[in-house]
Image (spheres, coloured by chain):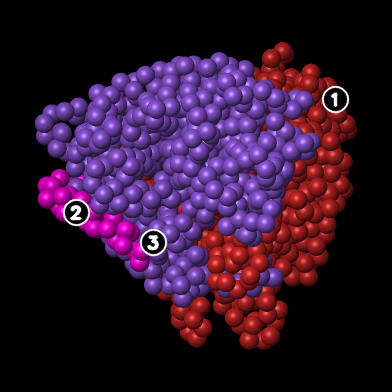
Chain colours: A purple, B red
Amino acid sequence: MSYQAPIKDMLFAIEHLAQIDQVAQLPGFEDAGLDTAQAVLEECAKLAEGVLAPLNWEGDQNPSALKDGAVKTTPGFKDAYRQYTEGGWQGLQHPQDFGGQGLPKTIGAACIEMINSANMSFALCPLLTDGAIEALLTAGSDALKATYLEKLVTGEWTGTMNLTEPQAGSDLALVRTRAEPQGDGTYKVFGTKIFITYGEHDMAENIVHLVLARVQGAPEGVKGISLFVVPKFMVNADGSLGARNDAHCVSIEHKLGIKASPTAVLQFGDNAGAVGYLVGEENRGLEYMFIMMNAARYAVGMQGIAIAERAYQKAVAYARERVQSRPVDGSMKESATIIHHPDVRRMLMTMRAHTEGCRAMATVAAAAYDAAHHHADAQVRKDSAAFYEFMVPLVKGYSTDMSIDVTSMGVQVHGGMGFIEETGAAQYYRDARILTIYEGTTAIQANDLVGRKTARDGGAVARAIAAQIEQTEAALHANSSGAAQTVAARLETARLAYLDVVEFVVKHGKSSPNAVFAGSVPYLLLAGRLVAGWQLARSLLVADALLQKGQDTAFMQAKIVTAQFYADHVLSSIPGMRDAIVAGAGSVTELALDAF
Amino acid sequence: MSYQAPIKDMLFAIEHLAQIDQVAQLPGFEDAGLDTAQAVLEECAKLAEGVLAPLNWEGDQNPSALKDGAVKTTPGFKDAYRQYTEGGWQGLQHPQDFGGQGLPKTIGAACIEMINSANMSFALCPLLTDGAIEALLTAGSDALKATYLEKLVTGEWTGTMNLTEPQAGSDLALVRTRAEPQGDGTYKVFGTKIFITYGEHDMAENIVHLVLARVQGAPEGVKGISLFVVPKFMVNADGSLGARNDAHCVSIEHKLGIKASPTAVLQFGDNAGAVGYLVGEENRGLEYMFIMMNAARYAVGMQGIAIAERAYQKAVAYARERVQSRPVDGSMKESATIIHHPDVRRMLMTMRAHTEGCRAMATVAAAAYDAAHHHADAQVRKDSAAFYEFMVPLVKGYSTDMSIDVTSMGVQVHGGMGFIEETGAAQYYRDARILTIYEGTTAIQANDLVGRKTARDGGAVARAIAAQIEQTEAALHANSSGAAQTVAARLETARLAYLDVVEFVVKHGKSSPNAVFAGSVPYLLLAGRLVAGWQLARSLLVADALLQKGQDTAFMQAKIVTAQFYADHVLSSIPGMRDAIVAGAGSVTELALDAF
């Protein structure tokens, strides 16, 4: 069950696709060049491979358990978390003002991938803390920042996001948790929140719950939701911990996967009321929560890539070891390791190409995020932000969707052994299954892609991306290799199909919302496939150029083959997806409700 | 977690697609008309819905357990099995000479689906017994038949298939279990078999193991494998049970799913040797085993359809009940049940269309099986057999592959609740995952499709099926409805793509085996999609005709919409699959082995 961080591929994406040199020219990121990236990734890999990965299976077998209101995490997790915080990993991307390292997302994203490949259940705790930090940084008062931020950035305390209630999942308008102002600037919070990741645990001294609730008299729906900090333990003026707040874990869920990660039902205010502190202004909670959500959505996309990478590595290891049947081409007289069989190769290539494609997409998106936040030029910031915002639903929705298929193939490569839990492949399959659901289902991501990211600007950003892809096609055409020509042709066909869909979405968004939303998830998956394939096409060009210079021949050749495989086997599916979206909307909603 | 047998859809397929009237004209099936089918299905539904379905979740939570060499099955299973045997269900398709009911597969298949929808873990026991019966019927001596068949047909005893050994999974040439002739016509069997479904349990008095082993001096590889009956308890001359045989369960597996079904490691001959009786002739074991395998493969395909149906029903029930968000078309001012949301509808329609399509395909295949075995005309028998044989890898490989996607969508429809085990959707997702693996992985099915079923006859049967599809297209063209025209166009495009692939397989099978086998599974999935879509297209024609007569309007309209949905959303993917197979073979095996 060993895991080896794919540092080389990560650095390839960071250096050549995300162009870390340009990121290092942004104000504030002067020290964040390739050397820094390499040093950080190598250090992170030690933690991931040596400390976190060995606990992954244990977490599945011996998950978090609730007793008397306290959650005991898997043996080893607490110590691993200590090492995680001592290494300063929680603060990697957070401001130096609050004890962070202030590194760009372009580098931080790779670390998030590693931590999640090693142990997704563990990594969820820091992931939620990151979200809490983002929300406080953006909207917290100076007092809240002073009290909470440094402790969160060091990881001494952890954060949670409290959105969901039994009746309010995707639809936050239905939130009923209420907050009563106490006249002293504080509130008392009452209500039940479910599905709270690391809502209770024993790895940190305090837990900072960020809670959506309604203040009495607030408008109905999402415009009446406010955001509160509700600490597990009150914080004294000197920063020491005070009384236990009235926020308690009443149960944790029995889940399909990520079992080591405690998913809590939290009860706020069952006794005197849970003391809460308003974040920002009343009734703007959803807006702030979206800051957390957007950070978390990107990170969940990385989880998809991470679990796919882990499943791929395990499948490759098994395929190299398991001996079964002679090769079909008669090249060996004895039974061979199954990696010699074309169908096993097809599965491994599929797993590899999806993983590398989504990694490339996410890394490029991270660089756009960095430029959006740090570039000196306002127009570049704006364009970069628009690109990043378009990428978020793809990174989240598409990388997680592909991770379900990839982890499923990982089981398949193992044959019967894949179905036996001790083998470990099944755990990835179970763990991955949450990724298309939490932090907004794929349908919610697709709503975002269709509504805010495509229809709102009349498809401008969507088409701008197509124009960039076209430039890559031109570069491929200028390259003489057969692989480049193949990829160029597939990419062009796929881009044109994508443009058809963008046109369909823009044209019918208002007039036929049912038709557009019938194809919203397929549109997201199509766009994700295209952008990942585009980045692999760029990889091919880079690899070909470096190959000419004699650099790392085997690695560069592999990049080229992987790009071609992706074009042949994944991009080739895009025209059919277009047809389903554009021509097939009617049959999606035509069946009478009582006929189901 | 209730289950309602989809009797109406089953009877539609049995009556109109498989044409039960024609089956009932076959010698031996005179009483097996539509009325019989309906009566049998209704009776079976009672057992499935009332007895077996309520035990499904219990089986997952409280699975079979091994203690002191004995397996205790889930509480309730033993009694349910008693009811199953008392109802005569084990003998449904088996000869009346041995106590069976001698019904056609066209009817029996629907019962297998129901039993598996209700409780797949339970249904595996009868499924394996069916295989043992087939093998003994075909190759067993009169003495073996006399001793074992009736007890198996009544279900008083159960059967197992013992193929796999730790080093021999897909590759049976590697079987090492040995059988030593004792000079009295019996053998002593020594070896270890793994993954033996219901290899040990407490639901029946005796277990009849069918075991692959090598007799000393036999040729190497698969031509030196013989098949033996090794009973758990010896059988006395009067049919009563004698001494315990030296075949023992040493462990059972901890699995991802189908947990109630004990998967045993069996040790043969650890003491004096397990007494075994040769089935048929020495060294022809593989041939006989294929008889069992073929029966079992079809049944595993039905399991795919069964679990997809169950997942669909559960998802529909949740979507009708869960309230979340307003409809995107503004048709309601309040939050609606999620079945009103287009993306949920898309998922439900996808689940439904796949399930009905595969059911139709399997039912038509069953009718071909019946004709192949019972028709008076030798040419019809031959053609029907060829059609059925072509269908087996599709029913097995494709229906199970789609069941993984469908059960995954079932989880997705449930949102966060889907990830909580108590909801039950996750169990189907876990259970389904074995189906593409056991009784031959999808790759093994695809090898069969490519080698024995396509290349061997130069693509004759494959093309004959395309010709039949073309006739359906002609009938669709003659139909004036828009749905028929849409389906006709998609079907034609898909059929032509399929023919390209058949051509590719036939042409390159010998010269470029790596290229052909790189696309073997995609070919299987493509062919499965096409045939299922073809049967739904036939359904559309039937439904349209019946609609004209005013029959069951809502049901017939639903058939038409489902066929159109399938054409728009599934058949539309086939040209892209063709491209990947025909143009993408090279990149599958190009990556250097050490580059993975």
Q: Is residue B205 magenta?
A: no
- Return the chain for callout 1: B
Q: Residues within 10 Å of mark 3 (few under 14, many from 20)?
A: many
**Amino acid carrying mark 1 in the image:** Gly
Secondary structure under the numbered disc 1 in the rendered image: strand
Residue at the limit of the structure toward the top, as seen here: B271
Query: Is tag 3's residue or tag 2's residue first in the polypeptide sequence?
Result: 3
Query: In this view of the protein, can residue A387 be seen by the observer?
Result: no
**Which residue type does callout 2 highlight?**
Gln
- Seen at 76% across and 31% down, the residue is B64
Asked if residue B49 is positioned above or below residue B447 in the image, the reply reads below
On what subunit does the disc labeled 2 rest? A
**In this view, A473 is above or below A337:** below
The residue nearer to you, when weighing B125 against A183, is A183
The dot on residue A31 is: none
Residue A114 horizontal side relative to residue A476, left or right: right
Q: Are marks 3 and 1 in contact (CB under 8 Å)?
A: no
Is there one chain holding both mark 1 and mark 2? no
Tell me if A275 is positioned left or right of A271 in this view: left
How far is mark 3 from mark 1, CA to CA?
75 Å
Which residue matches tag 1? B242
Q: Quadrant of residue A467?
A: bottom left
Residue identified by numbered label 3: A454
Residue drawn at 13 percent across, 47 percent down: A479
Q: Residue A474, position in %: x, y?
A: 16, 54
Residue B216: x %, y % from top left: 56, 20
Give, as a single range, the part of the protein colored magenta: A457-483
Check disc 1: other Cα within 10 Å, few if <14, some if 14-19, many if 20+. few
On the image, numbered disc 2 is attached to which residue?
A471
Spatial CA distance of label 1 from label 2 is: 80 Å
For image coordinates 65% across by 81% down, the residue present is B546
